Amino acid sequence: MKAMRFYEYGGPEVLKLDDIEPPQPGPKQIRIAVKAAGVNPIDWKLRAGYMREMMPLTLPAGTGYDAAGIVDAVGKDVTGVAVGDAVFGRGQATMAEYAVLHDWAHKPDTLSFTTAAAFPVAAETAGRIIDALAVKAGDTLLVSGAAGGVGSAVLQLARASGIRTIGTASAAKHAYLRSLGAVPTTYGPGLTERIAALAVDGVQAAVHIVGDGVIPELVAITGDPSRVVSISDVQAPQYGVRTLFQDGDATAALERVAALYVAGGFTLPVERTFKLAELGAAHDLSAQGHVSGRLVVVID
Ligand SMILES: NC(=O)c1ccc[n+]([C@@H]2O[C@H](COP(=O)([O-])OP(=O)(O)OC[C@H]3O[C@@H](n4cnc5c(N)ncnc54)[C@H](OP(=O)(O)O)[C@@H]3O)[C@@H](O)[C@H]2O)c1
């Protein structure tokens, strides 16, 4: 099968289109013929070697966690899914013609493979954020970095639970945030004052998804570091803020977003699609930090 891999850490040019044996699913895993695979920031961070201490890789390494496709092999102890089923989920080395998934859900017929491939990491992470903050209906959640994949998923899962959201993004994306049920505001200087004007009843919790240096302001806005979490800043604990770096089983989150998609309450825009051999360009665009929703690689 064709697979994108890298033999050394480095820029996008280290990605090579290899011809290798397809992986075999282990117990509680499935293999899919990949139709589409979502690009996450972790993909280029790993490739560049930024995570080599936290998550060392055996090289050559495949890349990609998100995928949607057709089940073509089922491992031991797998129930509820069969060869030929259309699924989306999380796995390893998904930027390939075949990939092994460890968490998945059936793909609704009305959901395209391309859009489904954008969901898994964003949906699992968003569910984990909302659970960790224990926000409930009527609370206001401030989302720093609301327009990307994870932020867009948080806004929609919050809306589905009656949680109010204020999201930060550049002005050009404010209509997009409104379409996801959020009150938008810009990031940068003056955030505390803008939030005070927007949230007259206060902000009960905040999540730092993107935004350099904003964590102290999120603590000041909520008035309590235990009401703030970060998914991307290892320095957050110095402000008393929890980090959420450990992912969990994604199955429940995937089933939830599939059902919400069918009910019209969840989706992620696919800003642009790429061919497998163009993955380096997708990594480059993701690393610029201004994608709305997700970038997706479509496998012919
Ligand atoms: N811990 C975990 O389990 C976990 C899981 C998933 C992701 N992550 C991490 O979380 C981060 C976000 O992931 P993602 O997939 O959501 O990324 P993404 O989709 O690439 O996020 C892009 C968005 O960030 C926004 N942005 C850029 N600068 C900003 C700023 N200063 N303030 C607020 N928003 C800003 C951009 O909006 P504008 O264009 O309007 O600037 C853009 O829409 C990454 O660092 C990723 O590695 C962690």
Image: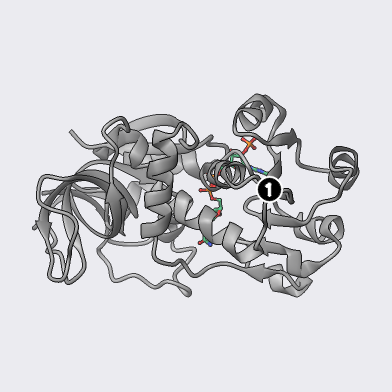
Q: Is residue 229 above or below residue 294?
A: below
Provide residue 41's location: percent of width, then percent of height: 48, 51
Left or right: where 280 falls relative to 196: left
Q: Residue at x 73, y 48 (%)?
A: 138
Provide residue 96's location: percent of width, then percent of height: 21, 48
Q: Is residue 78 above or below residue 271?
A: below
Which sits in the foreground, 266 or 36?
A: 266
Provide residue 244's location: percent of width, then percent of height: 57, 67
Provide residue 129's location: percent of width, then percent of height: 58, 59
Q: Quadrant of residue 145?
A: top right
Left or right: where 194 falls relative to 151: right
Q: Quadrant of residue 251?
A: bottom left
Residue 15 appears in the figure: no
Which sits in the foreground, 9 or 129?
A: 129
Left or right: where 153 falls relative to 137: left
Residue marked by disc 1: 143
Looking at the rendered structure, the number of numbered marks drawn on it comes to: 1
Q: Establish whether ligand 1 lies closer than 8 Å to the Cβ of label 1.
A: no
Q: Residue at x 60, y 38 (%)?
A: 147
Q: Residue at x 66, y 29 (%)?
A: 178
Q: Residue at x 16, y 56 (%)?
A: 31
Amino acid type, residue under disc 1 in the picture? Val
Q: Secondary structure at mark 1?
A: strand
Which sits in the foreground, 169 or 16?
A: 169
Residue 276 appears in the figure: yes
Q: Quadrant of the C terminus?
A: top left
